[in-house]
Image (spheres, helix red, strand yellow):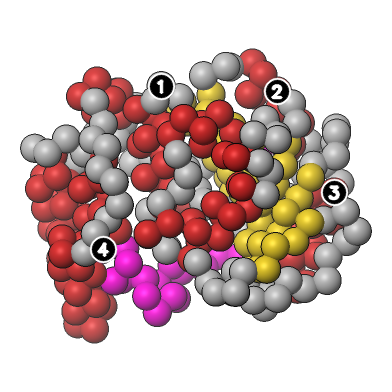
Amino acid sequence: MKLGAVIITMGNRPDELRALLDSVARQDGDRIEVVVVGNGAPVPDVPPGVRTVELPENLGIPGGRNVGIEAFGPSGADVDALLFLDDDGLLPNTDTAELCRQAFEADPKLGVITFRIADPETGVTQRRHVPRLRASDPMRSSRVTTFLGGANAVRSKVIAEAGPLPGEFFYAHEETDLAWRALDAGWMIEYRADMVLNHPTTAPSRHAVYHRMVARNRVWLARRNLPAPLVPVYTGVWLLLTLMRKPSLPALRAWFGGFREGWTKPCGPRRPMRWRTVWRLTRLGRPPVI
């Protein structure tokens, strides 16, 4: 299988980006073609052979990655699968790409592989980086219903059939939107504990827009993808969970502002999943109400 890699950058982590590119170049097997997208920022110096695209404005995470996809032809058709990697991540093992090839070749219905993210100093995998409800054992591989945005491999046929990442989201939950559409199209998603991306332990709330966009995009996710009866259930469950977590008053204000925005602003095309996909998600351990 021919692999490509898409990396988006704000140009503010040149050393980490170079280390990541070096780790991609060290992968076993055929060479991986790499595109680095400067998301509203110049791309730092990169090794020879690495292609770059510099955007005049920040399109957000899904928008930047979509530009990278199209650099490999329509829906990434010039390659069989694309790796999406955070610019401050690193592939510590040289067999990750080869494991991806083997997994895709062994299972024609496998559409997305999501890697295990581990802190480079401690080796710890944060609970939020295990994309399932039963997240206590990050070393257990399994079928899942979503994937991690900066540590994954996606078959290009998935993008051709399910569509690109939702550019409207800008940040947060864009992976789940694509995952639900991929599952509805009949593809499977697998979490692989043996495929590792090293990434420093961080809190998602470090981003100033976190609470607003998380709330807004939860609503958009439901409005775009769920059968009508499940939309209020899904959003209501997340409202209750947010209140139970007792966020600070400023965070709660931002969250409710985003929640309101999710109902009042356009969210892109609505393509509700089939009820058999709802059942499929439920059998995989994550019914689409949470």
Q: Position of residue 278 (x, y in %)?
A: 24, 28
Residue 38, by quadrant, is bottom right
Task: Name the residue at 16% across, 52% down.
Answer: 235
Q: Is residue 106 left or right of residue 271?
A: right
Mark toward the start of the polypeptide (2 vs 3): 3
- Which residue lies at the image location 70% right of the left edge and 35% below the top edge? 78
Residue under label 1, please give it: 186
Density class for disc 4 (Cα within 10 Å; few <14, some 14-19, many ≥20) is: many
Of 58 and 98, which appears nearest the observer?
Answer: 58
Q: Is residue 211 magenta?
A: yes
Measure how far apart labels 2 and 4 are at the Cα level.
38 Å
Identify the residue shown where x is 20% and y is 24%: 275
**Disc on the earlier residue, 2 or 4:** 2
Does the magenta-highlighted stretch encompass residue 23? no
* First along the sequence among labels 1 and 3: 3
Residue 14 visible, this orientation: yes
Mark 3 surroundings within 10 Å by alpha-carbon count, few (fewer than 14), some (14 through 19), many (20 or more): some
In the rendered structure, are the residues bearing label 2 and label 3 in contact, judged by CB atoms less than 8 Å apart? Answer: no
Q: Which residues are magenta?
A: 191-216
Q: Is residue 52 left or right of residue 214?
A: right
Instruction: Say if 149 sits above or below 207 in the image.
Output: above
Q: Earlier in the sequence, mark 4 or mark 1?
A: 1
According to the picture, the residue beneath numbered tag 2 turns out to be: 102
For the question of whether residue 282 can be seen, the reply is: no
Residue 216 bears which disc, if any?
Answer: 4
Tell me: residue 243, above or below residue 57. Answer: above
Residue receiving disc 3: 25
